[in-house]
Amino acid sequence: MPILITGGAGYIGTHTCVELLQAGYEIVVVDNFLNSKPEALRRVVEITEKDFPVYEVDLLNKESLMRVFAENNIEAVIHFAGLKAVGESVAIPQRYYQNNIIGTLNLCEVMESFGVFRMVFSSSATVYGMSNNIPFMEELPLQATNPYGRTKLICEQLLQDLYISNQKWSIALLRYFNPVGAHRSGLIGEDPNGIPNNLLPYISQVAVGKLKELKIFGDDYHTHDGTGVRDYIHVVDLAVGHLKALDKIYNSQGVEVYNLGTGRGYSVLEIVRAFEHVAGLEIPYRIVERRAGDIAVSYADPQKAKRELYWVAERGIDEMCEDTWRWQVNNPNGFEEEQNQYNMNNSLIIE
């Protein structure tokens, strides 16, 4: 019985697909390809030498989603699908609330109608808001400060309420910190649209010559070098965390929350220096004004995941930079545009 991966063509989704397939799971992928490309899934097949059904479906289209469940005997869902740019969420909040919340609600309703009650949900450390209680622990009060973060928080609350109403549900809420890196093959990695929102792809695009310089937002924070400190986690470690969470929901009921981070923070300048060392070149940068809403320091307390999921992040900052650079050098323009209609052997795409 397969695992449904919503948003499976995205950055974290593709890496999780690889880990699931290599661990012997069957998968079905749903994606609307709004912020991802079918080519990413073709490369998952290339890495794993395993095929799987793919549906081009938007979660706002409940009828099409029901067809996916009707045609596949789904036993659990890993739910990645959603819009995720903080700045964009401030500019067009209504789109984020509709897409992220209504899409999740539709998914839950369809799951329930087909008797599927296991879910791993992609949440975010943004739900901790501007808290200064470092490291962030799962028990902290939640206070999202932007529309994107609020959609994640509302979805968490929605899933908590689902279990209260029906105790068949078994749900793991995974709060990510800062995913970086790429698969060691160099075949899949982060391919942002336009100017990257995240630090590592921004640095790597400067390094490869796509962008002129890196903008560092503020050097006057109360940190050791004045730049913001974040918990960077290798995307493969993050993907493995989803497999561990899947094991958990197969053997329990209820809703549990887990931080997925390393428990260590690196400053922006430390990341720049580490990348320069790996790539053997200098990254030009310019200090600009702080971004509204950014905090000085953010990193996880990952002890609950270690204790209950038996999961620990294994890859360090050098490996994160090496894998990012390998991906960028091999794919200077990311995943090249491909036609949406394609077949991966027996795979299926539905309009």
Image (cartoon, rainbow, N blue to C red):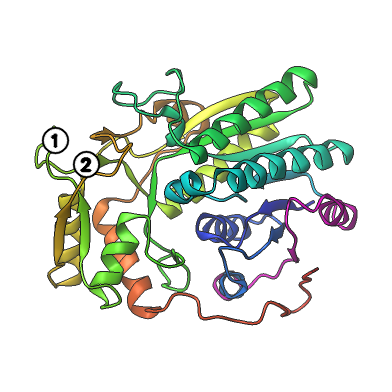
The amino acid beneath tag 1 is: Thr
Which circle marks residue 228 in the picture?
2
Which circle marks residue 223 in the picture?
1
Which element type, helix, strand or loop, lies under badge 2? loop
Q: Which quadrant: the C terminus?
A: bottom right
Residue 99, relative to residue 26: is it above or below? above
Which element type, helix, strand or loop, lies under badge 1? loop
Which circle marks residue 211 in the picture?
none
Residue 88 relative to residue 136: left or right: right
Which residue is found at the position 63% from the left and 39% from the top?
120
The residue closer to the viewer here, 60 or 302, is 60
Residue 14, relative to residue 151: is it above or below? below
Which residue is found at the position 81% from the left and 40% from the top?
111
Which circle's residue, 2 or 1, is located before the other in the chain? 1
Residue 7 relative to residue 68: left or right: left
The residue closer to the viewer here, 316 or 337, is 337
| Callout 2 touching callout 1 (CB < 8 Å) | yes
The residue closer to the viewer here, 203 or 26, is 203
Residue 32's image quarter?
A: bottom right
Residue 56's image quarter?
A: bottom right
Q: How many marks?
A: 2
Which residue is found at the position 49% from the left and 30% from the top?
258
Q: CA distance from mark 2 to mark 1?
A: 7 Å
Judge whether residue 152 is colored magenta. Answer: no
Residue 279's image quarter?
A: bottom left
Q: Position of residue 76 (x, y in %)?
A: 73, 43
Q: Residues within 10 Å of mark 1 (few under 14, many from 20)?
A: few
Residue range highlighted in magenta: 46-73
Q: Position of residue 209 (x, y in %)?
A: 25, 78
Q: Position of residue 103 (x, y in %)?
A: 71, 45
The amino acid beneath tag 2 is: Gly
Q: Position of residue 50 (x, y in %)?
A: 66, 70
